[in-house]
Image (cartoon, rainbow, N blue to C red):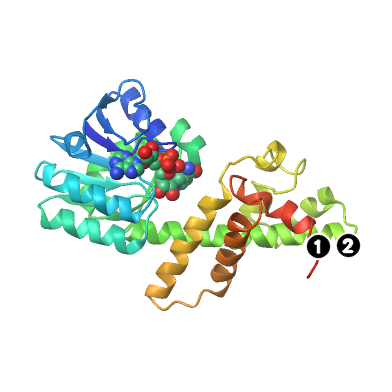
């Protein structure tokens, strides 16, 4: 397939490299990131999009997505699909999809989970919003870049699924970390805590698969000095998107709001920036109730 790829940073770079390795023709554009081997460099986003059957974007946020979409949509071939894999606000995803459809194109919002490791290994999970036809067109590319693509519904459904999942993740990580810190102060051995909780009703992905306590459970960023992994500032971004969406539809999300406030404090006022989001555990360890 002929693919335009815009935004070849930490995630987009390896995703584009996997498409090239699978035999697709990829023309790329990024303001700063180098092109992976085999990706043909274009002089602009519009140039990368010209003549492509699918244009993939992997950009930092909704404002940048809207700006790039404004440039590429007029350059795209009739019937082509604009597939945004960035994590952005639901409103931007829907606005860009609407603009694409008005221009005679099709569009998908297809944010991912799996991080840089999943992007490199080609094992991402895609959560996808948009038409059945567009999903069918891009499905072979999802199969190259990922291990699973779930068609969640109409435009915006992919971003909705992503922020709901990550709201659960942020809240659960905090709960797991504060419980470990409480267990410490009660004199409970961390390994015993893991042995009980990981097989009891408090179990979760954050405890069982990504344990925030070093030396306990399977290998995780905690065993690597809390180098990310999934950085606390990216968790903060997703939690803020969840709260923006909750405000827009008048949903009551007190735990999501508390998690967003705590990660904001950790990233912006404390030492959380650049650390894995599980570094909440050493944060709680150092603190008392005051
Ligand atoms: P990144 O900052 O490494 O990459 C973004 C790239 O977009 C950069 O190379 C930047 O130069 C480029 N860019 C910005 N504006 C541009 C423009 N106008 N035209 C062309 N290129 C432009 O970020 P990333 O970690 O690759 O994340 C990309 C997206 O994926 C984000 O929305 C993020 O939330 C999401 N995401 C990231 C992870 C992760 O673990 N890194 C996991 C899941 C989802």
Query: How packed is label 1: few (under 14 Cα within 10 Å), some, or many (20 or more)?
Result: some
- Which quarter shows the N terminus? top left
**Marks 2 & 1, CB-CB < 8 Å contact:** yes
Question: Where residue 69 sits in the image (x, y, percent)?
Answer: 22, 49
Residue 18 visible at all: yes
Residue furthest front in the image: 269
Residue at the right extreme, as displayed = 187
Q: Nearer the viewer, residue 95 or 71?
A: 71
Q: Nearer the viewer, residue 95 or 186?
A: 95
* Residue linked to disc 1: 182
Which of the numbered marks, if any, corresponds to residue 143? none
Where residue 115 appears, as percent x and y from the top left, is 49, 42
From the viewer's perspective, tell me whether residue 144 is left or right of residue 236. Answer: left
Where does residue 73 sit, x and y in percent of width and height? 16, 48
Q: Secondary structure at mark 2?
A: loop
Q: Residue at x 82, y 48 (%)?
A: 191
Q: Secondary structure at mark 1?
A: helix
Q: Which residue is mark 2?
A: 186
Question: Which residue is depicted at the point 17% across and 53% down?
Answer: 100
Image quadrant holding the C terminus, namely bottom right
Total numbered labels: 2
Which percent across, then down, holds residue 204? 64, 56
Q: Mark 2 and mark 1: span between their CA atoms?
A: 6 Å
Position of residue 80 relative to residue 130, above or below, is above
Task: Name the one closer to the observer, 279 or 104.
Answer: 279
View quadrant of ligand 1? top left
Q: Which residue is found at the position 90% from the left and 58% from the top? A: 187
Q: Residue furthest top?
A: 37
- Asked if the beta carbon under badge 2 is closer than 8 A to the nearest atom of ligand 1, the reply is no
């Amino acid at each position: 397939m002929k693919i335009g790829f815009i935004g070849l940073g930490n995630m987009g770079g390896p995703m584009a490299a996997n498409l090239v390795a699978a035999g697709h023709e990829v023309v790329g554009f990024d303001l700063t990131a180098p092109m992976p081997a085999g990706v043909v460099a274009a002089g602009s986003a519009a140039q990368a999009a010209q003549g492509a059957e699918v244009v993939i974007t992997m950009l930092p946020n909704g404002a940048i997505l809207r700006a790039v979409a404004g440039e590429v949509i007029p350059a795209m071939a009739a019937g082509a699909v604009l597939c945004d894999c960035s994590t952005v606000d639901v409103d931007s995803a829907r606005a860009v999809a609407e603009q694409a459809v008005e221009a005679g194109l099709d569009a998908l919002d297809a944010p991912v989970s799996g991080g840089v490791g999943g992007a490199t290994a080609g094992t991402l999970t895609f959560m996808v919003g948009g038409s059945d036809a567009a999903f069918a067109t891009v499905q072979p590319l999802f199969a190259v870049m990922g291990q699973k693509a779930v068609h969640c519904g109409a435009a915006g459904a992919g971003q909705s699924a992503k922020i709901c999942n990550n709201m659960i993740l942020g809240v659960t990580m905090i709960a797991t970390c504060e419980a470990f810190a409480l267990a410490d102060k009660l004199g409970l051995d961390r390994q015993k805590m893991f042995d009980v909780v990981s097989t009891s009703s408090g179990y979760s992905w954050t405890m069982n698969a990504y344990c925030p306590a070093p030396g306990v459970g399977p290998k995780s960023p905690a065993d690597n000095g809390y180098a990310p992994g999934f950085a606390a500032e990216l968790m903060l971004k997703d939690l803020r998107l969840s709260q923006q969406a909750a405000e827009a539809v008048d949903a009551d999300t007190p735990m999501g709001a508390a998690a967003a406030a705590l990660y904001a404090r950790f990233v912006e006022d404390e030492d959380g920036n650049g650390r894995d989001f599980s570094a909440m555990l050493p944060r709680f360890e150092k603190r008392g109730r005051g």
